[in-house]
Amino acid sequence: MLKEALQYLVSLKENKTYEIHGETYSDHELTRIEKHIDRPTSIEVNGLDSIVKLVKAEVGKTPTPIFIRVRSPRSVHVFGTLDQQMDRSYLYSATCDAPDFKEGWRNHESAIIELRSAFVQNEGTAYLLDLLSRISKEDGVTSEDNGVSQTVSARQGISLKNYERVKNRVKLIPYRTFTEIEQPESEFLLRLDENTQVGLFGADGGKWKLDAKERIKTYFEENLKELVESGAVIVMM
């Protein structure tokens, strides 16, 4: 009895196939055991220069070509070519740790601090800082805005009223991509409200992103020139 039971249990492990209406069926589900392949651990860094150093130091230790993909103005991924199993190793990634500019409204004091610390100084920041320096919460502000241009009235004391036409668009260079490259300049719509809030809204249709990605691509092509020319490294967007 015990022998028969054991034989029955063994038979349960056997893979049996059945032909039904011209199709072959199995009563067992088969699972493919993947072969173990040693792969490098992906490394995360914050600068483009770190990617350059890693690629130069380890280019001979992994199959070439090595691909550098500029995913966005704030992200770069580096990965290897396909192996015999049609898989690839993901080697490095870089994520920008510079402050990311947020369009929208900000209060008077925050706008001044941001213009001083989070923007490359140019004519646009000089214009805005001068404008904001002549407007305070105590003075109060009224505005006339037709959607094309805006006239702001800043009350000084109780009798003096100074009218000034505010620029509709201003060119600014916020820090919003890797610091190793020149930050792209773009146009912003400028608005001021009656509570001295400052509004900055992107007006270039996202062109700055394409400019930044192109500059990152150029950075790698220049700093990995020999490897790029030999075909060991391929830079793409």
Image: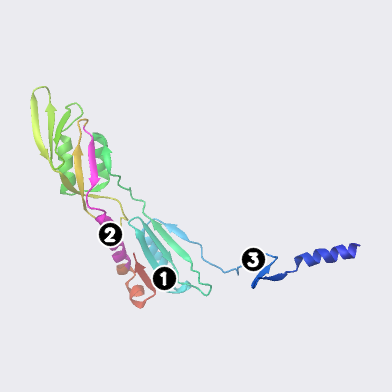
Mark toward the viewer: 1 or 2: 2
Left or right: residue 208 compared with residue 224? left
Q: CA distance from mark 3 to mark 1?
A: 33 Å
Give the magenta-colored segment's residue range. Answer: 196-220
Residue at which label 3 appears: 31
- Residue at the extreme top of the image, as rendered: 158
Cβ–Cβ below 8 Å for labels 1 and 2?
no
Q: CA distance from mark 2 to mark 3?
A: 45 Å
In the rendered image, the quadrant that contains the C terminus is bottom left
Q: Position of residue 165 (x, y in %)?
A: 10, 38
Q: Position of residue 42 (x, y in %)?
A: 48, 61
Residue at 28 percent across and 56 percent down: it is 209
Residue at 46 percent across and 64 percent down: it is 91
Left or right: residue 29 compared with residue 174? right
Q: CA distance from mark 1 to mark 2?
A: 23 Å
Mark toward the viewer: 3 or 1: 3
Q: Is residue 183 visible?
A: no
Cβ–Cβ below 8 Å for labels 2 and 3?
no
Q: Which mark is residue 80?
A: none
Cβ–Cβ below 8 Å for labels 3 and 1?
no
Residue at which label 1 appears: 66
Residue at which label 2 appears: 210
- Residue at the extreme right of the image, as rendered: 1
Residue type, label 3:
Thr
Colour mapping: rainbow
Mark toward the viewer: 2 or 3: 3
- Please report whichever mark, 1 or 2, sits nearer to the chain's N-terminal start: 1
Q: Is residue 21 visible?
A: yes
SS type, badge 2 = helix
- Please report whichever mark, 2 or 3, sits nearer to the chain's N-terminal start: 3
Q: Position of residue 202 (x, y in %)?
A: 24, 48
Q: Position of residue 40 (x, y in %)?
A: 51, 65
